[in-house]
Structures are given as structure tokens and as C-alpha cells.
Amino acid sequence: MQRYDYLKAIAPEASDALAVCTGWGAREWWAVRPGDGNLKTRTLGLVSSIAAGLALALPQRKVIAIDGDGAFLMNLCGLPTIALQNPGNLIHLLFDNEVYEASGGTATASRLADAVALARAAGYKHAIWVKTPEDFRAEFVRARQRNELTLIAAKVEPGQPKNLPPLTLDELENKYRFMRYLEETGKKGILSPGFDSKL
Amino acid sequence: MNMGPKQCAAAIVGGLKKAGIDFVATLPDEKMVEVIRAVARDRELKHVPLCREEEGIGICAGAYLAGKKTALIMQNAGFLNCCNALTTTSLQLQIPALLLIYYAGDIGDRGFTTLGSVTEPVLQALGIRSYVLRKSDEIDGTLHGAQILAEDSKKPVAVLLTKSVLGVK
């Protein structure tokens, strides 16, 4: 099974959750759950931290972080920070393919590292390995209903389906559309254009 | 006017709030403990203690996208820790943040001269505007002004905090 198989399984359950993605996972997530509630991040490792910042600022919204093992390992120190804040609306997904897939496919150090044990040790109340897309979907639904910080992890084969549509968004366009989406759905202004201010 | 560390901390946190800041991530330097304590005590500020400064850039970026006005309090060694995140998240995606950086190795500060000597050149290399804050009567104006620059330029702006403005030796 590949990450795409798991993403496909949870997309129907994601509803209007905000999704923060990284690497190839972004293109795959957009393919299964298109929309302006998706944000692609750039800095390796920060997908979970950016998602946590969103979750803390918007406690009434569900936020999904779509993490990979390379990013997860680079930002291990982010786990205790997130656990201490304990945003119940954050669902942290980890797809562990044991390679830096977006950076050429060489091995990460995740083969012997137990990401679920790491998350639990950092203070995550819920963290679980699952082995099938069906179980992943079930745990995802459980995490949504429970509304407590959860990591759901799966070992996956590297690779993507062929013919995935590439993202056509410019990255700033992605940011602005994401922010406008938050404004529209939250019925609250966020952006304050400086060129029209009379401060 | 000679103020102690607690009074200085109160003035700095007051300045942050007057500038509209409502979300603060921190990683301490010894010289800033009173500032961080004051942030942690303040019920109007969301406080996120960090394990490493780089994740603070991510957390503040996420909070900004959702409408928070963010500040990151750290030492200049921590600023160096987050140069990649500043480049590939803050600058690349045009995300503002107020960086309150303790200026270790500033004039007269022992033990950190290497760190002090690279701080302003690295800020300049990143294109991050920076202001050195030395006097307590300049706290409000500098923080408010820096926050306006950050919001309008959609970039981080740094305010370097020195021992004199922190009321410490």
C-alpha cells in the first residue's frame, strides 16, 4: 500500500477539515480532497508545527497534518511542544515510507525508530500504528469524534499513482486562497491590506 | 530612568500588547526570563514554550494564517537555529512575525562575541530589517513600528533586545 491509498480512504471523512501537507503528499491530497482548505508547506519538518499553530489559533476547526518520516524526524523536538499545548482539534497523520521521497528517495533513519512510541513519549495522549487503509479510516473517524490530540501512523511503500494532476497553484496563491477560505468559513477578517489603512 | 528586570519585562510585554501581538512563542535566554515569565502570566497572550526555535517559526506561521499577530522571543543563537525556516517559510510565503531577539555579544557583553558579530550581518543577508532597542522609553514606539513594518511588508522584523532595555547586567 502507498500513502495515496490511505489518503483516498480518509478523504471522504475529512469534511471541511483544514489540511497542511508536505512533499508528494500534497499533490496526492489535493487529488483526493481538492479545495482551498489545503496548504502546502515548504520547510522540511515544519508541517506539524504549522498545523499546530493553525489548530491553536482555530480551536473550533479540525486541522490535519499530513506528515512524512523525513519531516517527522527532522522536527522531533516539535512533538513535546505540540503535546504540551495539546490541541484536541489536531489530527497528526504520519506516512512512513522510510525514504526521503521528495528529495530523491534515499533512506531516512526511520527503519528502527518507532514514531508512535516517540509521539507517546513526547506526551501525545493518543498515537497508534495502523496496517490497512480501512483501519486508518476508522482511527481517523475516531480521532475526529474524540477531539483529542492524536497521531495515526502507517508504514507505506514509496511511490505515487501515475498521472496524478500536478498542483497548478502558485505557492503565494495557495497561501492567500487558504487565508480567504478561513475568512469566508470563519466569517472573520484576517488580512488587513496596509495600502488602504489609515492608522 | 533605572528600571529593574521585572519592570522592564512589564514594559516590553505591555509594548507587545499595544502593538497588537496576541500569540507569543518563546525559548529563553537567561537575560529574558522575566519577559518570558510575564508572557506566560498574561492571560491575553497565547504562550507557546518551544524546544527549538525553528518549530516556533512554523507554529507562528500557522497562527498568522488564522489571524493571530505573532511574536517569537529567543536568543540570537536561536535566531541562527531558525534561518532555514525564516527563509523557506516566513520569507518564501511572505508571513510576518515580530522577532524579539536577545542580543548576546552586544557591545560590552562578555562570552558571546562570535555570536554577536554575526547577528546583524545574517539578519541583513536574509533581508530582515532589524532595530536595536536600548532605552525603555523607546519600547512602545519600536515594537509598534516594527509590527507595522512586519504586517505591511509581510516579512519578519527583528528587534534586538539589549541588557540595558531588559534592566539586567
Image (cartoon, coloured by chain):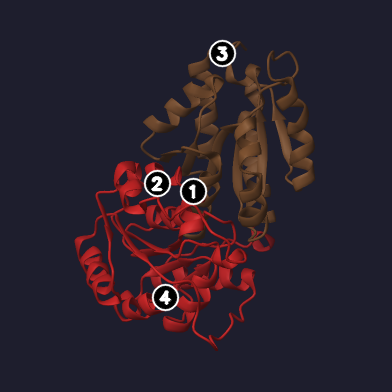
Residue A199 visible to the viewer = no
Q: Residue at x 52, y 51 (%)?
A: B58
Q: As displayed, is residue A181 above or below residue B132?
A: below
The amino acid beneath tag 1 is: Asn
The amino acid beneath tag 3 is: Met
Pointer 3 chain: B
The amino acid beneath tag 4 is: Gln
Question: Which residue is tagged 2?
Answer: A79
Pointer 4 chain: A
Instruction: From the viewer's side, name the closer residue of A192 and A109.
Output: A109
Q: Residue at x 69, y 55 (%)?
A: B153
The brown chain is: B
Q: Which mark is residue A75?
A: 1
Q: Residues within 10 Å of mark 2 (few under 14, many from 20)?
A: many
Pointer 1 chain: A
Q: Looking at the picture, do discs 2 and 3 lie on one chain?
A: no
| Colour applied to chain A | red
Q: Secondary structure at mark 4?
A: loop
C-alpha gap between disc 2 and disc 4? 25 Å
Return the disc, 2 or 4, that comes first in the chain's sequence: 4
Q: Could you tell me if the residues under marks 2 and 1 are in contact, i.e. CB atoms within 8 Å?
A: yes
Q: Quadrant of the C terminus of chain B?
A: top right
The amino acid beneath tag 2 is: Leu
Pointer 2 chain: A
Q: Looking at the picture, do discs 2 and 1 lie on one chain?
A: yes
Question: Which residue is tagged 4?
Answer: A2
Q: Secondary structure at mark 1?
A: loop
